[in-house]
Every structure is written in structure tokens, then in C-alpha cells.
Amino acid sequence: MIPPAENGKRTGRAEAPARRFASGTLVYWAGLILFSLTAPLLARDIPPDVPPPKSTAIPAPAIQALPNGLQVVGVERHTLPLITLRLVVKAGAELDPARLPGTAALVNSLLTEGTTHRTSRQIAEAIDSVGGLVDNGVGWDSSFLSLSVLSDQADLAFDLVSDMIEHPAFQLAEIERQRKQTLSGLKVAHDDPAYIADTLFQKLVFEGTPYSHPEDGTLESVPHITAEDLRGFHTRYYQPANCILAVVGDITASEAFARAARFFSTWENVAASAPPPLAAAPAPPGPRRVIAIDKPDAVQTEIRIGNLGVPRNSPDYLALSVANEILGGPSENRLFKALRSRQGLTYGASSDLVCRRNLGAWVAKTFTRTAETLKSAHIALEQMKSLRDHEISRQEMETAQSYLVGHLALEFETSQDVASQVLELIENGLPLDYWNHYPEKIQALTTGDVWNATQRYLDPDRNVIVLVGNVSDFKKDLKKLGPAQVIPLSEMDFGSPDLVRAQGKAGK
Amino acid sequence: MTFSLPFRRRAVTSLAVTLCLLLLVLEPAAASSVKLPSTDIHMVELANGLRALIVESHDAPVINVQVWYHVGSKNEAPGKTGFAHLFEHLMFDGTKNLGPNEFSDYIVRSGGTDNAYTTEDATVFWETVPSNMLPVVLWLEADRMRNLAITDKVFSNEREVVQEERRLRFDNLPYGGVVETLYAHAYAVHPYQHMTIGSMQDLERASIKDIQDFYDTYYVPNNVTLMIVGDVDWRQAAVEVQKYLGPVEAGKPLNAHAIPQEPAQTAERVIKLDLNVALPAFVEGYHMPADGTPDAYPLRLASRILSDGESSRIYTRLVYEKQIAVEAQSTGNFTEDPNLFFVFAIMNSGHTPAEGEAQVEAELVRLKTELVSDAELTKAKNQILRDFILSRQTVQTRAEELGYAAVVLKDPELVNTELARFLAVTPQDIQRVAKKYFVPENLTLVEVHPRKGPREQAAVSDATRGPDDRFGKTPLAGRGLDDQFGKNSLSGRGTL
């Protein structure tokens, strides 16, 4: 019943200056005049002027650290009888052993499948019987376990989360069960063109860094992960000094701290957990790489085009956020206008500024019917070139700034929103008052700053292009994009250096 | 390392895990002491027939506005499938005052987001914006309610976009077409037999004249329920609604829709598909009553018992214990008219759909022959309570629930009172509905078998056994099984 969530984008705060609407009105008039030259219509009405928005209160997070180093963040909201605990481990798929992609994900998936005190079934029963909701998963720089309960079950929630995080049993039967699930999931994903495109783009653009493998592992790696590998990963990274606990909702911060102390203080650091070394810097971009994965039954081609970007804490992040709005963010989105609004080539076009702790990428994403594959790829490339080679207009700049600043009100709507913003700051080593200064910093940017950033970080001549579709229908002109490698989907292997499965080569 | 036991139950657990397992089974789950906070709904009815429902919520300086047109894909005539959804797209494509996409420009400049979606029963347009934007949003919605202006070029462009959406959601996905095939065979006359996205052929044939008729008939204030939830003063909001939407002229009265009702199915129908997929799968659909009817509540709880959470029956049996499925779920697709109760599973390698079907059947038989325990029912009720509370978290989900209650269930107060209907359900009710609906003659089954050998066009071997078979349906690759089993609803403006 609830429509799919919007693409979340980093945003700004709604302390917008009153002149925003004045300048907005000017912009609309300019648009009108242009439009009425082409369409002879009567005088148009325009929407009413409104007062400036209320300012968004960005609550100062209540934070305390336990003696064992566990950071506890309390975010209160008492309008709903609901409490969420979210425990974040500052270790994700980038710490997978090089030969064993999927280790971090498998460790995390086993947290709910039995501890040294509770069986998998007992955990499920305990959570389900009180209407709890558990969620866990792995990102690139962190892993999490979250549990939401009605507010009369706070003790149970603390008890369960501490047990699952600290004492996973890694029983062989559960490991095998979870391994089987993972492998089946990977087999299904292998037929999903969007999964293949995203995973392959990531592999190519981050080649040579710990960010390039499939985060859920591969059909080749997952069978080789042992119980010892899982325990080793857990022991090394699931330590209190490496974790943050957010306690959110209908519970006061002081109660949250008291319960955290009660349930988590016996958790000990087993080793000095030095932060993992920074990932090796990616190689400088070479010539453009074009990889086309042939999926003969596809009726649509998934397209990814992009290059390296910046880590989340880069000083260029804000200028690039604006630039990304222009290229393919929710507000301006030149890709959407060029590919969908003007030509009807796609249902969706967007770009993502992917910012991880140590590095990032900037990628344009779309999909189109097979026959329009190369046309769509060329249009996306032109949009990227144009953004690199020309300064953006004042109107685009103002729309993007206005969106980013105004959207902050939406980003801080719920207590869970507030918690995830705080967690993101801590994970990326950003100051806790970051969002309070965000609006003024966004408003201070100029079109020149944005151009400067796009010249440095958009590299349409030396980027990575991934196409997943029925290649035989567009192979003829593929060369126009650059030297291309075509791989049949049935022979593709994310673990192999040349992406081709060994038996595929042998079998000719 | 020693471990302290701060919680009483754990002391028991650590003493004897098996004993505790037993205790957990014997000890009934306690009904939650938590109460659902009440929502105050303010209703305004305009002379033109438009109804507005306003709810104040001051947690954050934002509002969500939703315009529900009571028209969905079940209002589409044969040969004109996909129109309701195509029309939803066109509502962004310009009015006599605004150019294409200018609507959304006003929203994004405020920092807001907007979108729309279409279901079998309704077409919904929504905006989440900073709360000062209410007059702008109402102006924009009133403008497209009466001033839509679509050029030929924009129309044909949008039709191509919708065809791309169809490819994305159906034709290019691994388990595509499975649900479309199920509906095509489960229904003989009711328009739920077609997907909201419509068929490529019908989309191809859509003309601007068709579209104009659709607009004039359904996009009228007397077919609209407007939701405003968020940081507003409801009296002030009511004044703004009158100011901007009051002047929109009423349309003709809508006929109490002459939608053909589906006759009772009389024999099981089985369809087998060979698709380019890695793992076998199956989807079962049992006819069941409309949402909001008395039997809907025990069925919803039955669905929780079968499939909500890792301790649920189907998950436990197929995924956890037998390990024959990678995923297995049941869920009712509850709608305004009677729809289907689904059970589906994606099998693990080496296991056939028939194995999974047998295990599901065993669980359905158990539901019919054994009363569910109080503990299990209480667990399901706690999950329902939780979901009511979760749906109150954002202004958007609150407006969504309100719109659904008002338009589809025809009583906005249900956002407060519907929980009691769930809590009143007894184990006997669940047994009764299981016996009534989970019977073979009420079942349509689609099996998916991975194709062996070289690729070719998808083939269908139709082994339908019912008396009213309709052959010749081509299976169209479709929506992914995993994210498929909610409402048959389409979001309007994807950005990936």
C-alpha cells in the first residue's frame, strides 16, 4: 500500500532565506515568457506566494560512551509508543578477506540465528511474540543490527540486541543453512540485469581497492567461508570500542544510557582494535572501459556510466552534491529531462554520488529498450560532458541549493531519521554540528565552485561504461563507445580477473 | 568470558536451553499493554463534492498532501487496460498554466518530494513539503484537476515512458509475468484479471480522445478525497482547501461502478511456465473476500501466522527446517473488490515446486484441522498493533492509511477503530476462514520451471483444469517475485 520510497539524497536544512521565493518567482516569469513564444496561450496563473518555511529544529544528539568504548546515542520522541535500538559496527564489506568476499555479510546474517544463550528459533519467537521487528545488514563501511519493539518491551530489546551482537554461536547447522540461502539469493540475482550492472560497475571503478567485490560474496567465494573465518571476523571487529548504539523513540536519553550501561558494560574489547588501515588508493583512470554483458532474453538494457568520486568527508562533497542534483538528483536532473521528458527513452534516469569512508564514485544510471541502448548511452555521456565543459545556469544553481536546504526538514522528520543522520556523521568522522552549518555552506557555493568540481571529478573520456542487455542487437555500433569487451552472462564471473569463468574459457 | 544475566528469562535459558524452549512454547505470548494513540480527523466537504480530511501532527515542520481519485485499473474496460496508470503520468505533463514537469519544479524548489501511484482501486498523487507550502500545493492540485493540457507529442512521449516502465517491472525481470499469468487465469470477468500496468497492445492503441474522456469522467472533485496530514492548523487548512479547490466545477455524478463481479471458481487451475530463471518457484492464489469485510480480518491474521517473521509457520517449515526454499511467504492482496490470498516460494536448487506445494498444503491443512494457540494468535495481534504504530511514523504513511480507509474501506475512522476488529478475532474464526477459502476449487497455481537448453521465447504449457479456462495467454516476463506481492501498485516517476 505504501509506494516505493524515494531515492534518498543528502539534503539541507529549511532555514531558507525569505528571498528564495522572490527569486523563484523571477525564474518562473522567465520560463513563462519563453514558453508563451512557442505556445499561443492566454495569460497564465501562477501559484500563490507563501511565507518562508519554519526552521527545522535539529536536535543536539545526546551521546555518552561506556567505559568499554561503546558510544551510545539517545534520540527521544514520545508521540508513538515505539523504541528502536540500532547497533552499528564500524566494519563492513571492505574488510572482507581478499579471497573471501561475503564474509562480513555472512557474519551479520548469522547474528539472528543463534547465540550461546538462545537458539535461532528462540530468538525468532522472542521477537515475533511481542511484535518486534528485526533488521540487519552490511554496508561497505559498517554493519548493523536493529530491533524495534513496542515501548513496553525495552528490557527485552536491550537484552536481545546485546546477546545477538556479543554472543553469536556460529553453529555449523546455522552456517550451512545461511550459506545455502546466500547462494540461492546470488543465483536469483545473477538473472537480474540491474544487480549485474551495479555490481560490475562497482567492480570496475573500484578495481584494486577493497571496495570492488560483490558485497554479498560470489558463487565461488561463499562456499569457502568457514566457521573460523566467521568467528575471526566477529572477534576482530565486533568490539564495543568499534560500535555505536542508537536508542531511539519513546525512551528518555537518561533511561537509554542507564539500560545501555546495564546490558552492555560486560562486553569487553578482546584486542586493541586499531582502525583498519586506509584502503589502497585506486589506480588513476586509464582509457575508457566498456563492458557489455550479453543477456539474450533481455528486452531492456541497464546502463551505468561513471568514474571515481570523493569520500564522504571530502571538502568537495558539498559542491559535488549540488553538481549531482543538476546531473541526476531529484531536483534538476538533466539526465531525466534529456532521456525521459524529451525523448521517452526510459522510465528512470538518475545519478548517484556514492561516498564511502575512503573513496567514492559518481555514476549515471538508466535503462532503455534494447534498440535505443547506444543512443541513450550517448545522450548520458553528452550530459556529463556538458556538465564538465560548461558552467551551470544561475537558475539550476538556485533550484539545487533551494532543494538541498529545504529538504532538510524532510530528512529530520522522524526520530529514526534523526538517529541515522547522527550515525552517519559519527561513522564518517564528521562534526556533530555538521547539519547546523549545512544550509549556510550550501548557500555560499557559487556556480564557479560547482564548475570547478565537475571539471575535476567528471571524466567522461576516461570512465567506465557497463551495459547489460541483448548485446547482439546493438553490437554493431558498440565500438563507437570505445574498445568494448562482450561477455555472455552465462560465462561471467565477478571473481575472475578478466571476468570470465574458467570453464567458460576452457569449453570455448 | 562470563556473562551476567540481567534479564530474568535468560537465567532460565542459560540453565537449560531445551527446558526453556518448552517453556517458551507453553508460556502464552502476552498481549501488549501498549495502546494505539488516537488520531483526530477533521472532515471538510465542499459544494462540488470534494471531501478533505485533515490531521494535525506537529512533530516536524512538514506536511503530506494526497489527492485520491477513486479510479484505478478495475475501472478500465477490456481493450483499454493501463489507462488509469498512463493517465497518472499525464497529470505531470502540463496544464494551461504550467509546462510539462513544472508542477514538480515548484515542489523541489521547496525541498519537497512528490510522486503518484496507481492501484487496482485508486490513483493517488502526493507531495511531502515544508509546511508553509500548503497553499502552493493546493493551487497546483486544483490546476491539474481542471486545466490539464496535453499535446500529441507529450502524449506519445509519455506512452513510451510507460512502456519502458512495463519492461522494467515486468518484461525484463527473472520471474516476470508470473503474477500476471496468475491473475489472467484466476479471473474470468472481473477487471482484476489484468495488471494495473496494462498490456503493451492496449497502451499502443491509447488515443488522446480516450484520455480526454477518462479525465472528464473520473478527474472531478466529486470523485476526490484530499488528505492533509502534518504541521497545520486544521481550521486554517480547511479555509485554504475551500479557497483553492472550491472553485473547481463538479463533474457528472459517477455511476456506482458497473464492474462485473467474478463468479465463484469451481475447479483448481494449474499453469506451468518454463522461464529463463535459476530456481524453480510457484505462486498459489486463493480467492478471498474484499478488504474491510468480516472475513478479511481472520484472513489477515492467518497470513501473519503463516508468514510474518522467522517463527512463522511457512518460513519455519519450508525455509528453516526442510531447507527446500530460499524464500516462502503468504500474503493477502486485499482490495476494494474480492482479490487473492497468495502463497509463494522460490525453491532451493534441486527442489521442485511440487515439494514446496506439498509442504504449504500441510500447513494449510493444519490451519483447518487444529485451532491456532492463543499464544500464536496473540503474537499475530501484537504484530498487527506494531504495524499500526509503524504506519504512524511519517506524515506520508499517516496520510496513506487515512486515504486507504476513507476511499477503499469507505470509513476514515477505521484508522482508529480497525485495530479492534483484529483484536476480536478468535482461533475459531481463523479455522472457519481457512476451511472456507483454502480449498482446491478456489485455487489457481502457477509453477515456474527453469528452462533447460538454449534460450528462446518463453513458452507456456497450460495445464489448466478448470471449466472456464482461457488459453492463449502469453506469459510476459514480469515483476520480481520478492517485491511483487504487495498491492498491484505502480509508482509514477521512477528515478531508479
Image (cartoon, rainbow, N blue to C red):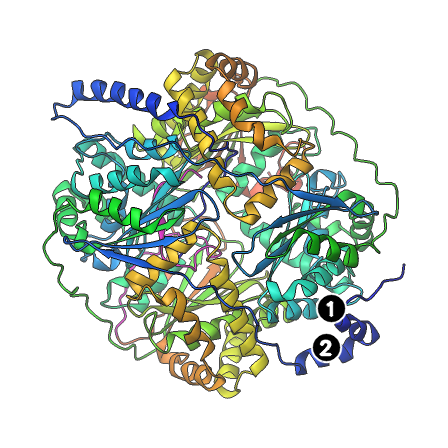
The residue sitting at 27% across, 49% down in the picture is B238
Q: Do the residues labelled 1 and 2 touch (CB within 8 Å)?
A: yes
Q: Give the spatial CA distance, label 1 vs label 2.
A: 9 Å
The residue sitting at 54% across, 16% down in the picture is A453
* Chain letter behind tag 2: B
Q: Quadrant of residue A358?
A: top right
Q: Name the residue under label 2.
A: B21
- In the rendered image, residue A410, in percent from the top left (x then y), is placed at 47, 41
Instruction: For mark 1, give the secondary structure.
Output: loop
Q: In this view, does B208 lie to the left or right of B275?
A: left
- In the rendered image, residue B221, in percent from the top left (x then y), is placed at 18, 51
Q: Main secondary structure of the magenta part?
A: loop
Residue type at numbered disc 1: Thr
* Residue numbers of the magenta segment: B468-496
- In the rendered image, residue B297, in percent from the top left (x then y), is placed at 41, 75
Question: Relative to residue A9, is residue B486 depicted above or below?
Answer: below
Question: Relative to residue B347, is residue A204 depicted above or below?
Answer: above
Residue type at numbered disc 2: Leu
Q: Can residue B67 be seen in this view?
A: yes
* Label placed on residue A119: 1
